[in-house]
Image (cartoon, rainbow, N blue to C red):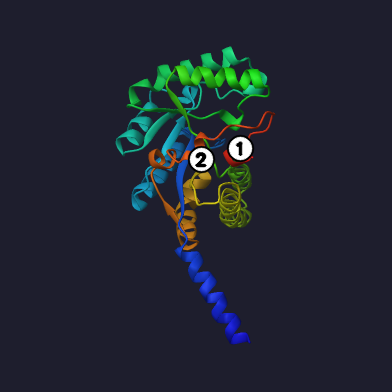
Amino acid sequence: MKRITGIVFFIILFTGWLTSKQMAITLDDLPFAYSPGLSEQARFSYFYRILDILDQYEIQTAGFVVGEQVSPRRYQCLLDFHNRGHIIANHTFSHPDLNNLSAGDFSEDIIKCNQVIEEFYNEVKYFRYPMLHRGNSIEKRDSVYDFLHRQGFIIASVSIDNDEYAFNKAYLDTLTYGDTAAADSIGEEYLAYMISISNYYDSLALELTGREINHILLLHMNYLNSVYLDDLIELLMKDGWEFLPFSEAIQDSVYLLPDNYIGTRGISWLERIQ
């Protein structure tokens, strides 16, 4: 009986390996996400470490820029990001919360970011909402949708949302106190969490659509990922995930389904279409 159970388990496991789970990695808050206590040079160093990891695995991503964070010196980061084959996209100028703004003021902030990054736009330009907040009323949500459509933006939805930013904050805060053992523990928890949350949203996608979709993973251009992105990619691949370019993933028809959510939360696109 144990032998039969073992064989069945192996067949199930092997079948799982053959299932194609695909995702694109995207990075929010370029040029640098939350990184208090780090020098400007340290920020540049972690930015380029992340770029090197993406090069190593031949992963093409999209980076969503907060315009007010782009100084003349930091502009070089965007140039290098673009020159390595990645997409530069709009994440507003000041990273405002749409829940607290009018649709008009929010739209103006998007235009202001355009003025910083418009030379990087090709035939297609992408936009992502800060905190994934799309409006806490039907009128506000649909007004911004109409604005983005008129401006020719494609919304860069996220299927695999997560609390990676909280791990980054905890990791940096712990390092500030010199507790490297605690920081290592946070890093290990982060990796396990990301595998778990990725599979959760993959299961949700199967439940909602009856098929595997092209997932879009939200990460940030932060210090934590400069340390752990290599390990995360390896673990995801061992778990059966394959990586595809963001420009391909966003073409999945799942991202064209109606948005059924009105509220204050920033949530996965899969939760918005339920």
Between 187 and 177, the one lying in front of the other is 187
Task: Find disc 1 in the rendering and name its residue.
Answer: 273
Taking the image as shown, residue 83 lies to the left or right of residue 182, namely left
Up the image or down, 270 lies above or below 16; here it is: above
Task: Decide if residue 31 is on the left or right side of residue 106.
Answer: left
Q: Quadrant of the N terminus?
A: bottom right
Q: Pointer 2 and pointer 1: residues touching (CB < 8 Å)?
A: yes
Circle 1 sits in a helix, a strand or a loop, which is it?
loop
Residue 46: where, in percent of width, then height?
A: 44, 42
Residue 75: in sight, yes or no? yes
Q: Which residue was labeled with disc 2?
A: 254
Mark sitting earlier along the chain (2/1): 2
Give the quadrant of residue 44: top left
Taking 270 as reference, is 225 left or right? left
Q: Position of residue 244 (x, y in %)?
A: 39, 47
Q: Front-most of 124 and 115?
A: 124
Q: As displayed, is residue 179 above or below residue 143?
A: below
- Mark 2 Cα shell of 10 Å, populated few (<14), some (14-19), many (≥20): some
- Mark 1 belongs to which amino acid? Ile
